Image (tube, grey):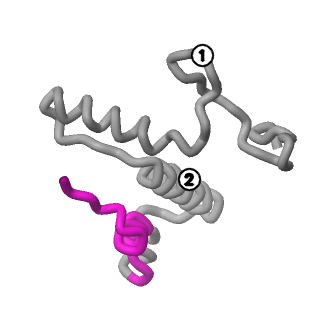
Amino acid sequence: MLLFVDGEDGLEPATLWLTESGLPLKYTSWTKVFERASDRCAAAGLDVFATPKMLRHSMALRTLIALHNALDRRLGLTPAERLHYEEVYGQVWLMSRTCSGTAVSR
């Protein structure tokens, strides 16, 4: 609840960033922020770009893998047991990339 404030129309995301003029950045402005950053990367000759959606998916995947590793430690799975599990059920990373469509090429 610390990431939300009680606004005129109910709960809304708390403002965490300010614009260049010092005003709060609306949460809907993130797409433009990412577009500009990607343009700067392209201008610097870097084949790198990102979108807010990619960031959300990346964070979700990192969290999933961290929880996955914590469960492995809790259950005491050996590397061989982990490998067997992945052979039977598949790898979380590969399943996530396939399902979410996060494999992006420019």
Helix, strand or loop under label 1: loop
Left or right: residue 9 compared with residue 55 = right
The answer to whether 92 is drawn above or below residue 88 in the figure is: above
From which residue to which does the magenta span run? 88-106
In the rendered image, which residue does mark 2 sit on? 63
Q: Residue at x 50, y 41 (%)?
A: 30
> Percent x, y for residue 53?
46, 54
Q: Residue at x 39, y 64 (%)?
A: 93
Pick the front one: 62 or 48? 48
**In terms of sequence position, does the residue under pointer 1 or pointer 2 come before the other?**
1
Most extreme residue toward the left, as rendered?
45
Q: Amino acid at mark 2?
A: Thr
Give me the C-alpha separation between circle 1 and circle 2: 32 Å
> Percent x, y for residue 8?
86, 42
Q: Residue at x 78, y 41 (%)?
A: 4
Q: Are marks 1 and 2 in contact (CB under 8 Å)?
A: no
The total number of labels drawn is 2
Q: Is residue 83 visible?
A: no
> Percent x, y for residue 45?
13, 31
The answer to whether 74 is drawn above or below residue 31 in the figure is: below
Q: Amino acid at mark 1?
A: Gly
The answer to whether 56 is drawn above or below residue 45 in the figure is: below
Left or right: residue 62 compared with residue 27 = left
In the rendered image, which residue does mark 1 sit on? 22
Label 1 CA crowd tier, 10 Å (few <14, some 14–19, many 20+): few
Q: Is residue 46 visible?
A: yes
